[in-house]
Image: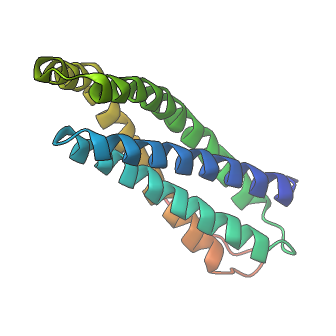
Amino acid sequence: MVDPLSVTASVIAVAAAGLRISKGLYQIANTMGSAGQEVRSYADDTRSVTTVLEGISDQLNKKAKHSWTKAERVILDILDICKSVLGPMNDIQKSLNLLLVHFKLSNMKLRQVRARVWWFFKYKEKMLSLRQSLQNLNITLNTQLAAMKLDMPEGVSINIE
């Protein structure tokens, strides 16, 4: 049996990482002009997943008396996927922070244009892929949260295929 407290702690840790990444992306978006809108949408998706993780954490805390072994295992599997998406997003955010420094320090419009073109070609495809993964995770997490909220009697399960 999985320890509910360790599952809750894992959910909180991943949610905190997602929140940190989304805040960083919002900060970058606010300084990037027209390119910022796209970065903001990535931040929105990251924040959305974080919100659902917080809901799962709340639900786990409410149901601590019950056995959630199957749900906990599913959540741990989903968290592993979340980490595999948030890790690269965090790396990209760090690189974009360097780009942000170049934006702030650059007086020359040509350098700013070059930096925006660099962002577009270097990170856009990867970010689109990560964004799709976040959207899929959001659906999966919402489904899991809904199943947890149903408070199903012992022996009743929901199969999602």
How are the colours assigned in the image? rainbow
* Front-lying residue, 1 or 55: 55
Q: Position of residue 110 (x, y in %)?
A: 11, 18
Residue farthest to the front, as pictured: 107
For residue 38, above or below residue 64:
above
Residue 159 seen in the current view: no
23 vs 9, left or right, is: left
Q: Position of residue 31 (x, y in %)?
A: 29, 41
* Front-lying residue, 111 or 133: 111
* Front-lying residue, 27 or 134: 27
Q: Position of residue 127 (x, y in %)?
A: 33, 33
Q: Position of residue 96 (x, y in %)?
A: 38, 28
Q: Which residue is painted at 59% across and 71% down in the image?
A: 147
Q: Which residue is painted at 76% across and 58% down in the image?
A: 8
Residue 6 seen in the current view: yes
* Front-lying residue, 94 or 41: 94
